[in-house]
Amino acid sequence: MADDTASVRTPDDLEALDAVATAALIRSGEVSAAEVIDAAIARIEDRNPDLNAVIHTRFDEARAEVAGGLPDGPFTGVPMLLKDLWPGAAGEPFHLGVQGLKDAGYTATVDANIVRAYRAAGFVILGRTNTPELGLTATTEPLAYGPTRNPWNRDHGPGGSSGGAAAAVASGMLPAANASDGGGSIRIPAAMCGLVGLKPSRGRLSMGPLQDEWGNSVQHVVCHTVRDSAAIMDATAYPFPGDGVVAPTTGQPYAAQVTTDPGSLRIGFAAVSPRAELDTDPDVEAAVRATAVQLEALGHRVSEDSPAGLGDQEQLANFSTFWVAGAAASLDRLGSWIGRELTEADVEPATWAMAQAGRMVGGPDVISIQGAQMSFRRQIAHWWDDFDLLLTPTCLRPAPVLGELASSAEDPMGSLLGSVPYAAFTSPFNITGQPGISLPLAMTSTGLPIGIQLVAAYGREDLLFQIAGQLEAATPWSGRRAPGL
């Protein structure tokens, strides 16, 4: 993305800038941090009633922080929103999309390490974004806060579980927002909202103090440009005391990789579902094949080849079992937070059904699944002995209509099962811990974004930033915005 700060003359022009350009403008003195924050607040107040992306605001606190002086970091004065799955600051609302926590008026007791990193980098946190209950499904329609709508088409959802974050960024409220990914929850909303969404390697960013780095979930941001994803990771990807996994450093600073020539890479691709029973939307398949052709034209060696185990039914069953066991454990933990056991009335039908199923999973089952996932991780990793990158759809289908994946008492597990086509190509790499990036390279015939995923070997975000930067230069997307904004 070219340096476009020279054309900015008023705060109203800030919407077109990414986080890197916004920070540069503040450093130059052409605008102040206060002007940037006020402009972002105005956009949230104007657009959020239509989209329901932001569920808690801290505008007065943010303005006071700016007035009191911000840390001197690479993103001083740039606005940030937090996904409501992570504690932001002690004493502030923290509900994870759960009605019982909302009713209890629960507030965080600790600061998340990622939030400490954001603040040290100079970001100003303006509030919290909507998420499905406990982040369990690929749609952001929690009963506690209502559905978030997709800026590209309000009849459709923005995906999940970082749907509020993606809708906020895609609608221009701010240039980047915190997101997390336990089965595709950065990449799926990025794909559905026309954004860049990188799932980092396991252990790249701290998950403390409430979660461990060894799990399937990681976090980063959704944004418009590759350079924002790279520069924000440079500013926040460092270990904290007690972190269980620290990913190897290869190619840092990542911002420099965005303009680095990757050379001729060996790229395999899969254009259709790894599972025969799941259909692939024709527009999605066509987009993957077109990207393969484009990569070949850029000088890469491209072939239709992918890891054989991606459609392994046993691994899908293991992932699902681990998922529902996690739901049960989460309800127990949240009950300890509010001082009473959560009941069926405190959560959605899907969450309750998953938790009840999870309570049937024994300790030996969990240990066995962990062993199977370890074997899967080692098996899949060997494919990258012969290839540098894997190209796939991010999701098999574009954004679903609101309500299609929503939880219901009549079909409580329907939202989980309905999420499978959206996570078929994302969840395997949460098991393996590999980095994957979704890029907004195509649109459906009906005007919905299509995300294209690229996956690298563990620890090789540098390759993802190189190829993503090359594709962004060849097919610029950062200036594309949803209609009607």
Image: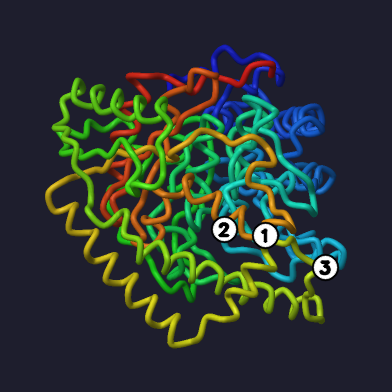
Q: Name the residue type under label 2.
A: Ile
Q: Name the residue type under label 1.
A: Pro
Give me the residue at 79% from left, 49% from top.
145
Estimate the spatial distance between the alpha carbons at disc 1 and disc 3, rounded to whole Å.
Answer: 14 Å
Q: Are marks 1 and 2 in contact (CB under 8 Å)?
A: no
Percent across and percent down for residue 28 are 57, 26
Estimate the spatial distance between the alpha carbons at disc 1 and disc 2, rounded to whole Å.
Answer: 33 Å
Q: Name the residue type under label 3.
A: Ala
Give me the residue at 86% from left, 68% from top.
104
Residue denoted by label 2? 114
Judge depth for marks 2 and 3 and give the one in front.
Answer: 3
Residue denoted by label 1? 412
Estimate the spatial distance between the alpha carbons at disc 2 and disc 3, rounded to whole Å.
Answer: 32 Å
Q: Nearer the viewer, residue 65 or 395?
A: 395
Q: Earlier in the sequence, mark 1 or mark 3?
A: 3
Circle number at residue 456: none
Q: Is residue 122 visible?
A: no
SS at badge 1: loop
Circle number at residue 345: 3
Asked if residue 198 lies left or right of residue 305, the reply is right
Q: Earlier in the sequence, mark 2 or mark 3?
A: 2
